[in-house]
Image: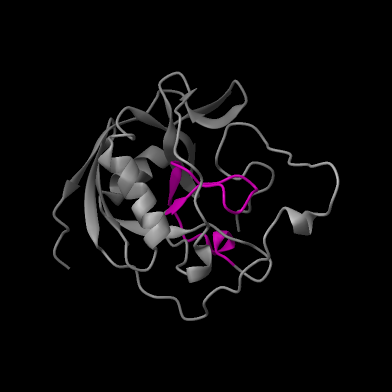
């Protein structure tokens, strides 16, 4: 089972957090108890994500994941993701994007949001979740799509987890193709595609019939 240490998805370098004075309890909130009977993902709004590797359709849950889902929506509404990269791709794990433009230039974001992973929706294949640093409530614009079931990324008694807020409803073949591209380490960024993979646009679309 793949686990994550050091860097927790949001940047290119491993992140060490320290502070002078006081204990960790003053800086880090208590781990919430995850819901043992989580809701099913709701498809409240759908987006067509056009990439240089093909198109995929995302269904986003604004009902059960109101903070996380609306955060993603506000970035889409202001065309933030247009021209950003899938800057991290790991075969049989995840693809990650939404924070850097060509040349791995960081894009300014809105304020971080509260981690809603305790709602309990699992990081299953095809789900989309928020990337963050080791700080639980640090997610901004970056997201990842699970290539396989990754229960080790779920909230638990010992982990804040990663908040799932939607899923790929069309185009998982594109996600799979992105996940297997050749990668390199560049300027401290690991698992970076050798050839950049751009998100051309993210636009609202009709949700596919189920």
74 is higher (above) or lower (below) than 150 = above
Image spot of residue 158 (x, y percent): 69, 66
Residue 145 colored magenta?
yes
Image spot of residue 111 (x, y percent): 49, 42
Image spot of residue 10 (x, y percent): 55, 40
Q: Is residue 196 visible?
A: yes
The number of numbered discs placed on residues in the rendered structure image is 0
The residue nearer to you, when weighing 75 against 150, is 75
Residue 153 colored magenta?
yes
User: Quadrant location of the N terminus?
Assistant: bottom right
Image-quadrant location for residue 153? bottom right
Image spot of residue 13 (x, y percent): 64, 32
Image-quadrant location for residue 54? top left
210 is higher (above) or lower (below) than 153 = below
Q: Residue at x 44, y 39 (%)?
A: 110
Q: Is residue 127 visible?
A: no
Q: Residue at x 50, y 49 (%)?
A: 93
């Amino acid at each position: 089972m793949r686990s994550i240490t050091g860097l927790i998805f949001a940047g290119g370098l491993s992140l060490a957090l320290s502070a002078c004075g006081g204990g960790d309890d003053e800086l880090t909130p208590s781990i919430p108890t995850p819901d043992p009977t989580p809701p099913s993902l709701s498809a409240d709004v759908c987006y067509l994500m056009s990439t240089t590797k093909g198109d995929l359709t995302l269904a986003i849950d604004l009902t059960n994941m109101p903070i996380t889902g609306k955060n993603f929506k506000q970035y889409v509404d202001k065309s933030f993701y247009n021209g950003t990269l899938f800057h991290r791709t790991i075969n049989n794990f995840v693809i990650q994007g939404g924070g850097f433009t060509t040349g791995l230039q960081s894009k300014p974001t809105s304020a971080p949001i509260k981690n809603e992973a305790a709602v309990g929706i699992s990081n299953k294949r095809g789900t989309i979740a928020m990337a963050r640093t080791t700080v639980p409530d640090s997610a901004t614009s970056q997201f990842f799509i699970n290539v396989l079931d990754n229960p080790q990324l779920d909230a638990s008694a010992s982990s804040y987890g990663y908040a799932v807020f939607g899923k790929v409803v069309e185009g998982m073949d594109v996600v799979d193709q992105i996940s297997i591209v050749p990668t390199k380490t560049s300027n401290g960024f690991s698992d970076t595609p050798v050839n950049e993979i751009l998100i051309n646009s993210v636009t609202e679309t009709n949700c596919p019939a189920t």
